[in-house]
Amino acid sequence: MAELVEFDSKVLAGAPNVRLSRRALITGIAAGTVFPFISSCTTNPATGSSQLILFGEDQVASMAATAWTDMKSQTPVVSNTRLKNQVLNVWERTTAGAAKAGHIDPNANWDVAVFDTDDVNAFVMPGNRVGIYRGITELTENDDQLSSVLGHETGHVVGRHAAERLSVSTAAQVGLMAGQIAVAQSEELRKYGTTIGALGGAAMQFGVILPYSRRHELEADKLGVDYMHNAGYDTRQSVRLWELMAAQSEGQRPVEFMSTHPDPLRRAEELKRYINAKGYALM
Ligand SMILES: [Zn+2]
């Protein structure tokens, strides 16, 4: 496992050794980087994956808050009460499935927005924000498929994919390579402070525009199916959903979800295998 440089955060609670001197820490805080560096991988307890997390959860959440406020002020939300209630019900039931797995706090508050556009898309933003578009709800044929979308998004939350994605893209931007950084110097820390400040404008991208990695997708798919199963939904419908997406994307209407969620048919196949292996259903 490569040594990665990370900011501390709640993500790392209970984890790694802080190897930074107190003086460097204080300098870092003064430079606006706020979080002490920790040099070690973070292992996500839900997924077992090792992650590069450059941003503290609170920090990411505050960037997301701005992006979320912007989105809600710029995009109409549905006035159809029935659709809103359907989404909320499926969301609650699906996340209860995630809570049953011990992956999320059953008492957490979520901000769920149903946007009134044709986009076939859904996303999560850090800070318990979930956005789903009318377009994708119209593509789904039943609550099980809707649960599959929402379970998948919950999987991204549990996998902390947004923070990792943002961190990896930031790491790429600043030429940050695993194991290559001397962090205990104030000059370095200041550089990061500047980079992070400049990212404000990019906040809009994470969670919505940047594609997830293949590994993130697979993790989210599997977690989503686990939550569906826990919630009593028909997990086979997750496979059907991806087939529908694939079919739709070959038609006239572009499927937004697929620009950030590639390979629908391959994923349908992998989901099938997973569902069979878990014994959730026979497909
Ligand atoms: Zn995804």
Image: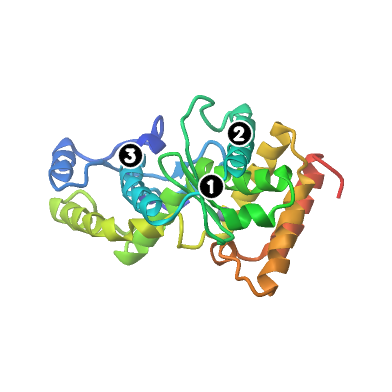
Is residue 222 toward the left or the right of residue 30 in the image? Answer: right
| Ligand 1 within 8 angstroms of badge 1 C-beta | yes
Measure the alpha-carbon separation of dots 2 and 3.
22 Å
- Secondary-structure class at tag 1: helix
Nearer to us in this view, 66 or 171: 66
Q: Position of residue 9 (x, y in %)?
A: 34, 38
- Looking at the image, residue 91 lies above or below residue 139: above
The residue at 31%/44% (across/down) is 62
The residue at 63%/27% (across/down) is 100
Residue at numbered disc 3: 58
- Looking at the image, residue 134 lies above or below residue 253: above
Q: Position of residue 153 (x, y in %)?
A: 56, 47
Measure the alpha-carbon separation of dots 1 and 3.
17 Å
The residue at 73%/68% (across/down) is 247
Q: Which mark is residue 156?
A: 1
The residue at 74%/61% (across/down) is 243
